[in-house]
Every structure is written in C-alpha cells, then in structure tokens.
Amino acid sequence: MPPNTLAQSQTDTGGKVAERSTVLGFVTDADSELAIREGMSELVPSIQLKRASIRQATAMLRKLPSPEVLVVDITGEDAPLAALHDLSEVVEPSTRVLVVGDRADMNFYRSLTRDLGVAEYLYKPLAKEMVARMFGPATLQRPVSSGALQGGRILAVSGACGGVGTTTISANLAWYLGEELKRHTLLFDPDIYTGNAAMMLGGRTGTGLRLALETPSRIDELFVERAAQPVTERLSVLAGDEKVTELAEIAEGAGRALLAALRRRYNFVVADVPSSPVPVYRELLMLAHQRVLVMDPTLASMRNTLRLLALPTGPDQVRRAVVVLNRLGQPGGLTRPQIEEALEMPVDVVIPYQPRQVGQAATMGTPACTASGGFRSGILALAREVAFVADGAVIVKPANDGPFGLGKLIGRISGRSE
C-alpha cells in the first residue's frame, strides 16, 4: 500500500470490511491520553485512543486493520526495543509509528528514530502543545519547521476586547516563566503610546522600541540587550512611552526583524499584543508560536472571541489560540457552561474573579501570582498550555540534531530506509 494512502483505505478482516483509522493510539495513563487527544484533535479527522501497554496493543493489532498513524506507549517496558520489533510484525509497512515513554536520554531517542525508523518519540509528562508541534508533522507527513525549533518561543497574548485583563495575564505569565522557572524571559509591549505592561512589573520604558520599529535595519543582539530593561536577573521588559502627539512611522517587516533578534536572546518572549488591526500587531500575531486569547464572562467578549478564533493561524502555529476565561464569577457575568455552549468548545484556562488581589498587585507594580489562590493556579495552568511546562518545570524539547524518522528499517515499523 502506498505510504500516502488516506483514512479511506480498507482491509478485509474475517469477511467484513473495516475502515482504517487515521490515528489509533494505545497509552497507559489518563494524563497522556488527554494530552494526545487534545493535541492532535485539530490536526486529524479521526483519532481513537485506548488504555493499553505496547504488549497489549500488539496483541490487539493482530486482529485489527493497521491505522495510518499508530501511537504506542512504552512506559514501564523492560525491553522497549524488542517490544517495538514485535509490533513491527503485525502492522503494515506504511503505518507511521509514534512512541511515548518515560525515558529522556538522547541515545534512546536516536535508537528509536534512526535505527528503528519510528517517526517521533516524546517522553512524559506530555503537554498537548508539544504533542501538536512534534507529532503533528509526523502525522501529516510534513517536515518539522526548523525555525520553530531554533531560538526562543514567542507567545502572543491578546484580548477579545479592551479591559479583559490581557496585560495583567501577560505580565504574570512572564514573571512566572522568568522568576519561578528560571528561564530568560522578556515581556514585550508593542503599544508604544498607551501600553502599561512594564508598569505591571515595576519595570522601566525606553526609546529603544520605537527606534527598532522605525529602523529595523539597526536591530541586532546588542541593540536588543540595550533596549530591553531588566526587572530581575531572568526577566526583562521591552516597552515604550512615546508622546501621543508624535506619530511613529513603523517600517514594514519591523515586527519580524525584532522577533528574530529577541528569539536569539530569550527563552520566552511574552508579547502583549492588542487585537487592533494594525499591521505590526497582526504581524506579531502571525509570527508567534502560540496565541493566547483572553476573554471575560461578558456577551461582548464572547462575541469577539468567536470572531478572533476565525483568524488564520501563522506558519509556526500548530493549533488554535488558547482561550483564557478571566474573571469568572464577576457580578453579572455569564457562567462557564453558558460561555462554552456559545463558543461550542471548552475554554482552556479559567481564572477566577479576584479584584482585591489583582488590583493591589497592579497598583504596587508587583505580580499577583506571587500569592497562592485561584489567580496563581490559573497562571500555572496557562504556562502548562503554552510553554511546555508540567509540574513546575519546563519540558525540554528533543534537540534538532538531525533528520527525524530517517533510519534503517528493523522489522516494518515505518516502511522507510536510510
């Protein structure tokens, strides 16, 4: 069967014709099942997941048609390479095999992807964004974008409408990534006139941002280092405070040039991007690796959320915007079931209404997530969604040190050879 055969392929089993699944997965725990389901649901039309070990999966696949893409879990397996070799005896050569497990060493990763021909391997704990980014290209038979893997990660946070708490969430997310996870992080506010992201963290503004937007040819790593203002050892802000009577002439492509320089300097860039249809704002939204859309429990916010979710995704975005429902429980607001019914989808992150804690923190120029409670829990949940974070640590991505899935064939796992 040709490798590009789609899910319409059928095979005869016991006199009955069974449809071939697009993605069939066997995992051993609920958290991994949820991450895989949510991470791949936007990429493929059909995904079936079962709770089983690789040995149990091999036994079941003897009686089932081989899927286009097979996900197996080798967690706890004493002889994972032997188990995968046994699996290769029961699946068709065209099946693309994706593996999850609990081993994090690079030599094991190379053995799977180069020697066995496994399409991709991820180790637990899984994050659905990581699943989408790394399993997505293997599932769709597309190359992994090298630009998405090299350099820091751009997170664009925008609001469904004004006043929903976008800047508060951006600032607190940046603080958490920089201070608690110890990653070099920049809070970037492209609104050089009325932006107040720097004020949320007690940071300073400068003239460097306007200069960068007007003359992108001058942007380099030294320029970025001087323009960004340090807040702490691992956290900086890049923001302006220009007079509203002076119109800046933002050059075409300035956003792209600036983000390219920032990615070489920082692990994470959290951009507080207004939703206004200004060219540089739209450019930043398209170039981000992940968008975050903040809404509050109001009718106007819900309407605009539906409109903004319809925006096309950028080249390095493997999933839709993460929807954050902020201020849930505010007086007169809609309930979560009402909002999810109208959106026809669940919200990804919920942050409760805590006006006193958030208001005091904003007034003092300190992050609200330093205090325990629902707001902090919401920021941690957001970090897990967008920044490969699990259990208070950053999940390290596999190094991009060679072609994925190109290796000599053992058994018939991938149907490809070196």
Image: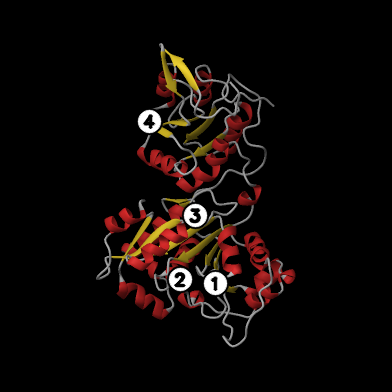
Q: Which residue in the rendered view is the most extreme toward the top? A: 15
In this figure, what is the number of numbered marks?
4
Near-viewer residue (399 or 345): 345
Q: Is residue 372 visible?
A: no
The residue indicated by pointer 4 is 50
The residue indicated by pointer 2 is 167
Q: Secondary structure at mark 1?
A: loop
Residue 359 location (% of width, % of height): 35, 76
The kind of residue on which mark 3 rests is Ala
Q: Quadrant of the N terminus?
A: top right
* Label 1, label 3: how far apart the Cα atoms are: 19 Å
Decide which of tag 2 and tag 3 comes sooner along the chain: 2
* Label 2, label 4: how far apart the Cα atoms are: 41 Å
Kindly identify the residue that appears in the image at 48 percent across and 52 percent down: 320
Q: Which residue in the rendered view is the most extreme toward the right? A: 217
Where 14 falls versus 72 (above or below)? above
Decide which of tag 2 and tag 4 comes sooner along the chain: 4
The residue indicated by pointer 3 is 387
Q: Are marks 4 and 3 in contact (CB under 8 Å)?
A: no
Residue 11 location (% of width, % of height): 48, 18
